[in-house]
Amino acid sequence: MKIDRVSKVYPVSRILKTDSLIHQKSQEKEKEDRDFEKALLLKKRDKASGTNKQSQKHESQ
């Protein structure tokens, strides 16, 4: 019967809404983290290959 008391204090719809908000926020955070990691990888890759070659060309001219 404790479950009935809890559900009266915290309605299931409210719990589900809160849970979905938490899930949505965590998904947004994961997406931001992936985008940040992707940007870092691209920056490292550009630094390792393209950018250095271009700067060397400019220096030789």
Image (tube, rainbow, N blue to C red):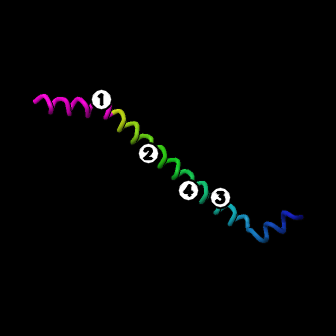
Tag 1 residue: 49
**Foreground label between 2 and 4:** 2
Labels 2 and 1 touching (C-beta < 8 A): no
**Inter-mark Cα distance, 2 to 1:** 20 Å
**Inter-mark Cα distance, 3 to 4:** 10 Å
Q: Position of residue 33 (x, y in %)?
A: 49, 46
**Inter-mark Cα distance, 2 to 4:** 16 Å
Q: From the viewer's perspective, is residue 25 above or below residue 50?
A: below
Q: Position of residue 44 (x, y in %)?
A: 36, 35
Q: Position of residue 55 (x, y in %)?
A: 20, 33
Name the image quarter holding residue 52: top left
Boundaries of the magenta span: 46-61
- Identity of the amino acid at label 1? Ser
Mark drawn on residue 19: 3
Tag 2 residue: 36
- Identity of the amino acid at label 3? Asp
Point out the residue furthest to the right here.
1
Q: From the viewer's perspective, is residue 17 above or below residue 31?
A: below
- Identity of the amino acid at label 2? Phe
Q: Earlier in the sequence, mark 3 or mark 2?
A: 3
Q: Earlier in the sequence, mark 1 or mark 3?
A: 3
Tag 4 residue: 25
Tell me what residue is drawn at x 52 percent, y 47 percent: 30
What secondary structure characterizes most of the magenta part?
helix
Left or right: where 20 falls relative to 61: right
- Identity of the amino acid at label 4? Lys
Tell me what residue is drawn at x 77 percent, y 71 percent: 9
